Image: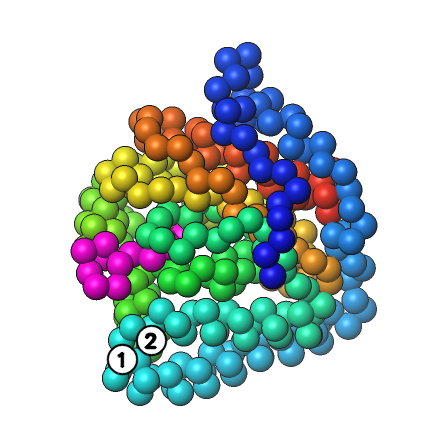
Amino acid sequence: MVTRPLEQPGWALVHDPAAQSPAARVPALVDRPADPRYHPGRLSPLWPLQTAVFYIWIALVTLVMGLAWWPKIRRDPSQAHVLPVVWTGRLLAAARTILGISVEVRGTPPTQDCIIAAKHQSFLDILAIAHAVPQCGFIMKREVLRVPVMGHYARLAGCIPIDRTRGSEAMRQIIAGVQAARASGDGLGQLIIYPEGTRTRPGERRKYKHGVGTIQAATGLPVHPVAVNCGLFWPRDGLRMRPGRAVIEFLDPAPPGGSASEVVERLEVVVEGASDALMAEAGAR
């Protein structure tokens, strides 16, 4: 479901010389009025049982689909790009049925090769973004390649493995992986990056890392910001999940140009401001 966004944060806000911080640059965005339709529901007294059933379902679906799709992908490796869309769709349907959590997608998900720079609050936003785009890819730890079945699927799906202990060498691995994917027949797809580097609680902010700006500067790929409020419904620890309608919002792509630090600064302003607006709409203050 794609609906028209209530407001698109203007990139021009970033250039206000009077503002000294990201929060100060986007005051209008966090004034979005609360809408009861988007407020999280009450925690069910049966939440431990619901959570257990849901995670058992995830394990079963992952196992069955992994085995069932293996012959198909061996015959046609391009099907590895279809599997994440189908798999995430099954999990999102289960979240809606078992937990009462649905996801609304606003804006226009990109279909061309690009970088998606997203706010990361929970596993739910991973599922929602991966399901919304046709060919998702992630930067992953090199160790994942050693996991049976999953490692093979991840490589075929266009995920880029890195050695996180190698510092600047890891960034060169990412850029080389991006360039190799773009030169391949399947293309890069939509590379999903979380500039904060980890999940954050609703309202929490971490300094954005410069990696996404470095990749954009080296490759010329467009950067599509994504705002979320998923942590209000599916918390970082994945336990006390509350029913309701979470939102992810695909925002206007970042304008090209500028240094890596300038790209990241603009992203931080827009993504944080829009995420705050979504949380305010859901009643979080």
Residue occupying image coordinates x 48% and y 53%: 109
Q: Is residue 165 above or below residue 136?
A: above
Residue occupying image coordinates x 25% and y 84%: 75
Q: In this view, does 152 lie above or below 169?
A: below
- Across and down, in percent, residue 253 comes to 44, 40
Q: Is disc 1 placed on a helix, strand or loop? A: loop
Indicate whether residue 73 is drawn in magenta.
Answer: no
Measured Cα–Cα span from mark 1 to mark 2: 6 Å
Residue 77 occupies quadrant: bottom left
Judging by the rendered image, the residue that carries numbered circle 1 is 76
Q: Which amino acid, by three-letter code, is at mark 2?
A: Gln
Q: Which residue lies furthest to the front in this view?
A: 4
Q: Which amino acid, by three-letter code, is at mark 1?
A: Asp
Q: Residues within 10 Å of mark 1 (few under 14, many from 20)?
A: few
- Identify the magenta region: 181-192
Q: Is residue 188 left or right of residue 251?
A: left
Residue 196 appears in the picture as rendered = no
- Between 235 and 91, the one lying in front of the other is 91
- Across and down, in percent, residue 251 comes to 52, 42
- Across and down, in percent, residue 284 comes to 73, 43
